[in-house]
Structure formats: C-alpha cells, structure tokens
Image (spheres, grey):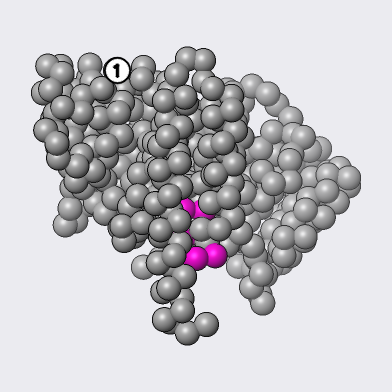
Amino acid sequence: MDPGQWEELRAWYREALSGRAASLESLLPAIGSEPVDVDATRQVIDIAQALRGSGGSYGFSTVSAAAGVVAAEPRDRLLPKLLGLIDLLRRCASHEDGPGRRAGRWLAFATDAPSSWDGEDPSDTELEGAWKRAADALGVDDQELARRIAVRLGIDLADPAAADGFAARLVPPALALEHGILPISENGTQIVAASANPTDVSAMATLERATGRVAHLDVLPPSTLHRILVARYGEPAGARILDVVVPAANLDRGAFRNDAPDPLTILVVDDEPGARLFCRTVLEREGYRVIEAEGGREALDTLSANPGTIDLALIDVLMPEMDGRELMKNLREDPVLVGLPVIVLTGLQSTGSEAKLMEQGADDYLRKPVEPPILIARIRAILRRVRATQTP
C-alpha cells in the first residue's frame, strides 16, 4: 500500500473514531446512573472490543490498548474508563495522538461544574488549570474537589500515606513520571495508583503492560501528586510532571511475543517434575528457551555453567535442601547474579509472606496455581523493566 492510500485509510478511521466517541458519549448517563444500566454496559463493552481489534490495524495502537482496558474483566470502575476512552478517541480523531494531560471535559462531567469554562471547550484546558477552575466554580479546595470526583466516578480518594514499596517496585520511575501516577498498592492481581486524571486509560494500559496486573487509578489533587512525585523521583528535566505530553509507545497487546531469532532463556527451578513441565510447555509455546533445575543447588550450578545467558529465573519457594528463599539470598549476594530478574512461585496465601519474598530479593511473585496468561504477562513485564533500566 502506498503512503497516500495509507493516509486515506487513517483519515477514514479518524472519522470512524469520532462516531464511536459520540456513541459512547450517548451512553454516559446510563453508565453514570445507579444502578448501572446493564444494556448500556454491554454496548460499551461491544464498542470497546471492536476498537481493540481495529485500532492497531490503522496505526492507532493507543486506541487498541485503551479499549482493551475498558473491555477487559473485571468490568468495575467502568465510568472513569469510559470517560477516558471518549477523550482519547476525540484526540485521535483531531490528530492529537499523544496521551496528553488535557482533561477539562471529564472534570466538568465529574464535578457538575461545566459553567466554570463559560462556553469554552474544556478539553483545551491543562489538567492543573482545569482543577483550579472547577474548584473555584464550586467554592471548594482541591481536597474536597477530589472527594467529589471520587464519589461521582465510583473510585477511591487516594491515600499517599498508604503507598507501599512493593507497588512502587513494580513501576519504573520513568513510567510514573511520564504519566503522572503514584503507585499505591498491589495484591498480586491488581495494582492501584494515584492520578490527578483517574480517567487516563493510556496510563492504565501502560501500567497494566508494565506490571502484568489489572490497573486502577484513584484520584489525588495535582498539587499534592506533583509534590510527592518530585520528592520520590525528582523533577524531570525540561517540564513539569503533570504537563508532559509524550507520544504513546506501541501498546498493542500482541507486540511482545519472544519471536526473536535468539530467544530469551528462562531458568525454571522447582522440585516437582509436573510443575517444571507445565512451565516449560507454557514458556516454549511463547518462544522462550527453558532450562530446568530440580532445586536451589542445581540452579546455582546451572547459572555458573551458563554465565550471562539466562535472562530470568522462575523459582518455587518450597523445595528440599536449598529452598527458594536461600537460593535468592545466594543470588543477591553474588556480584555477578545480583541483577538476575526473579519471579517466585508461592503456594502461601499470606500477604505478609509475599511481602517478605519481595524484601528478600524477588522482583515479583505469583500464587499457585499459576494461570498461563498471567505468568507470561509477569515475565514480559519484568523483562521490559530490565530493558528500560539498561537503555542509555
């Protein structure tokens, strides 16, 4: 296809996105009501699934990724996701493909304060300015405005004091700064972050891609969020955090298969042959090379015999002789192996036990029984974080 035909197709798709945005906007009252209209929910999901399948085909991978967030299970917190998808579709239709920080329109909806824009298009207002105008119109401070947003959108008011180091460990600093999000908590299957724009589906999609967990955004005033992010990560050069507009990366869900000619190698450490066979089957189906070890000592011997060739270790906790904890201790004390990414497989259901595993050196963990899609998602997430830290 020549460039002219490609641009014609993209122009046609932009018009289609504008129509989709209008259709979704017509469903907002039903989705924002109590109880949520079931038929309207089905229509939103149907549209999102169609967009997920079509966006990447026309060069709009951000649309595919964001629509996937809306269409995926669990389908709670649908209202903020729907608002974010509508905003993204409008921006793509008007040649603004980047994620951006313009969010006056959703803020007007969430606060019932559209009069604060006096007939202007609220999407032309930067996020912090939009917050100020809405707060002034309602005669409240940022914290009260955040509380009202949380109630209207059916989400939580973020508590920065509750932020744990385990959620932060899963989110690269560059990602947190790029999207203006503060990791708050994770429970193994979901991750929660604070944002001044809790409808930012691009941030949700990127967060899910980076962590292998379902992402939710709680709301926090931009001034508070900015102060905490600067204290934690430092001020990025050349721009304030919440004003950064960065072209979105390719977020297509199928873009991260390990199809390279030189496949990545994963060491599977488990004393149960059936568990190793399960992991080998799942990993090799995705294009990874697999090396097995029956226990911690054999794993150390294997790593010693294959210096620099193993990209990640998948380690069971409960093993005879040298268990997963002792193996990790050896890895983290070895100057050569200290940086090896490790995912721990655990049958323990205690949050405290999992937190301890992270403290002992695990980069992530999975509870048994392991679901293959989750296993692959976690591996890809960790390998992406490793690549991000190695990029000059």
Image coordinates of residue 75 in percent, x first then y, are 57, 30
Residue 245 placement: quadrant: bottom left
The segment highlighted magenta reads 57-64
Image coordinates of residue 161 in percent, x first then y, are 33, 22
Instruction: Give the residue pinned by disc 1.
Output: 147
Between 237 and 313, the one nearer to me in the picture: 237
Between 68 and 320, the one nearer to me in the picture: 68
Q: Is residue 58 magenta?
A: yes
Q: Is residue 112 above or below residue 190?
A: above
Kindly tell me whether residue 160 is visible in this rendering.
no
Q: Circle 1 — which element?
A: helix
Between 260 and 330, the one nearer to me in the picture: 260
Image coordinates of residue 241 in percent, x first then y, are 23, 46
Q: Is residue 379 left or right of residue 268?
A: left
Residue 32 placement: quadrant: top left
> Magenta-highlighted stretch: main secondary structure?
helix
